[in-house]
Amino acid sequence: MTIEEKKIEIISKVVDLDDDKLIDAVNALLKDRHEQPSPKAGWGKKMINHIASDFDDFIPPGFNQ
């Protein structure tokens, strides 16, 4: 099933909804999805406490320098 087919299926289900609470729930899900802030520089600070001294010594097969 392509993404377009999935969208059409979902839209047709939403169109057939008669429950006000369900419509509000779908709207809230879609609204929350668009209002999430994008990551900004510096948000990951202090998440990695230590990097081994030999971190760059081994390069897995298939990776080029």
Image (cartoon, rainbow, N blue to C red):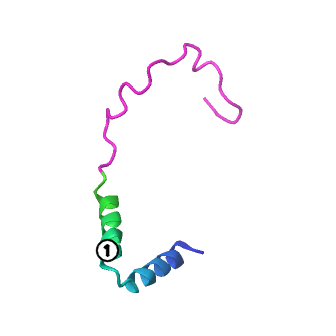
Please give the name of the residue rendered at 34% of the width and 43% of the height, measured from the top-left corner.
Answer: 39
Q: Name the quadrant containing residue 59.
A: top right
Q: Name the quadrant containing residue 2.
A: bottom right
Indicate the quadrant containing the C terminus: top left, top right, bottom left or bottom right: top right
Q: 47 or 57, which is in the foreground?
A: 47
Q: Position of residue 37 (x, y in %)?
A: 29, 49
35 to the left or right of 49:
left
Please give the name of the residue rendered at 68% of the width and 30% of the height, measured from the top-left corner.
Answer: 60
Q: Position of residue 29 (x, y in %)?
A: 35, 64
In what element is the residue under mark 1? Answer: helix
Indicate the quadrant containing the N terminus: top left, top right, bottom left or bottom right: bottom right
Main SS, magenta region, reads: loop
61 to the left or right of 47:
right
Q: Which residue is mark 1?
A: 21
Identity, as a three-letter code, of the amino acid under mark 1: Lys
Residue neighbourhood size for the residue with mark 1, other residues' Cα within 10 Å, grouped as few (<14), some (14–19), many (≥20): few
Q: Name the quadrant containing residue 30.
A: bottom left
Magenta-highlighted residues? 37-65
- Reply above or below: 36 against 44: below
65 to the left or right of 31:
right
Q: 12 or 61, which is in the foreground?
A: 12
